[in-house]
Amino acid sequence: MIEVKNLVKRYGSVEAVRGVSFTVQKGMIYGFLGPNGAGKSTTMNIITGTLAATEGEVTVNGCDIYEDPVGAKSAVGYLPEQPPLYPDMTPNEYLAFVGEARGLRGDKLWDAIDRAVEKTGLGEYADRLIKNLSKGYRQRVGIAQAILADPEIVILDEPTVGLDPRQIIEIRDLIRALGRDHTVILSSHILTEISAVCDYVIIIAHGRIVASDTLENLTKQYEGKNYIDLTVRGDESSVRRAVESIPGVEEVTVDPKPLGRLHVRIAADSAADIREDVFFRFADARMPILSMEYEEVTLEKIFLELTGEAPARTDSAALSAEVPADAELAEQPEPDVSDVPAPEPEPPQSAKPPKPKKSGDDDDYTPLFGG
């Protein structure tokens, strides 16, 4: 339904989007995930025709967004990050205005308004002024205008920003309901939102696509190993024999703890779930398991791995890397003091001793007004 090829957007010397390419298939909810400033909103604005790209192609339902903008835009409903609402209108008045702008008239217009109001749960609020609605209901009005003309594609840019937890849950339920009748693209930097709602995830970082797959496949692709942490009673050699004989185990670390306990960390093949085998091996060896924790790979871990940057070094090692090791041994030239003026004589000290500084003071600031 949507095909994006080599999309580039430059602002002067800054590239906000760098060669982004992806496709959107019918009948799915897509999550466009990335940190703030990654290029999500810029890409969404280009796809919807509200911003021109520097380079690249965007096709919506076979219509080029630049050569046939009306055909492309007629298939898309768009909710920007800041909903384009008129606060002195009611939702019904605002939706009528938007519907007429999209070419709807008469009964067709009001049937579309009724459907949008029903889908978004605006019924009892449809005749209140938008400025008197809560943030959550203003978001619903924004979504209502996006689905008003029953577009095949609905694009929502950060639809839950600024909402309270109850409103977030309600908007997520609404997005799932929209996914039954529309193809939905949900742009967000909130991991739980994407994992709770979306069928397919596109991760963008620094203006580039770094991953594009179903959530299940992404997890399998990037998980590597599964880890199990155990606290058991027993001796180290018996523990190692019990664990290392389990198929799929790749590495075992055993650390002694007080009171005869051992902390055991097991790294296993990502395709194997060895928890049951571990339990029965230790039961057969009569070594009680006091605790067991299973470490699963989550979207959060994948996201941090794909989008994270190494922190800048600020420690002494980083500083020493910039200074030659023998800098202190190098002979330093003595400064020329011939042109330096002689210091002025210090004024005589007052007979009254200075007021001692309070603990923690690091300057000589004196309040002007006795504060």
Image (tube, rainbow, N blue to C red):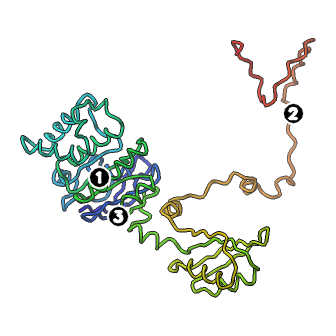
Q: How far apart are marks 2 and 3 (CA)?
A: 74 Å
Q: Nearer the viewer, mark 1 or mark 2?
A: 1
Q: Distance between the residues labelled 1 and 3?
A: 15 Å
The three-letter amino acid code for the residue at tag 3 is Asp
Q: Mark 1–mark 2 contact, CB under 8 Å?
A: no
- Residue 155's disc is 1
Q: Vertical placement of 224 versus 305: above or below? A: below
Q: Which residue sits at x=29%, y=53%?
A: 47
Q: Which residue sits at x=74%, y=56%?
A: 317
Q: Is residue 9 or residue 363 the one in the foreground?
A: 363
In the rendering, at what x and y percent does residue 364 appear? 77, 23
Mark earlier in primary sequence (2, 3): 3
Q: Which residue sits at x=38%, y=44%?
A: 167
Which residue, given by chain and number where applicable, does mark 2 sit on? Answer: 337
Which residue, given by chain and number where applicable, does mark 3 sit on? Answer: 199
In the rendering, at what x and y percent does residue 141 appear? 27, 40
Residue 339, quarter of picture: top right
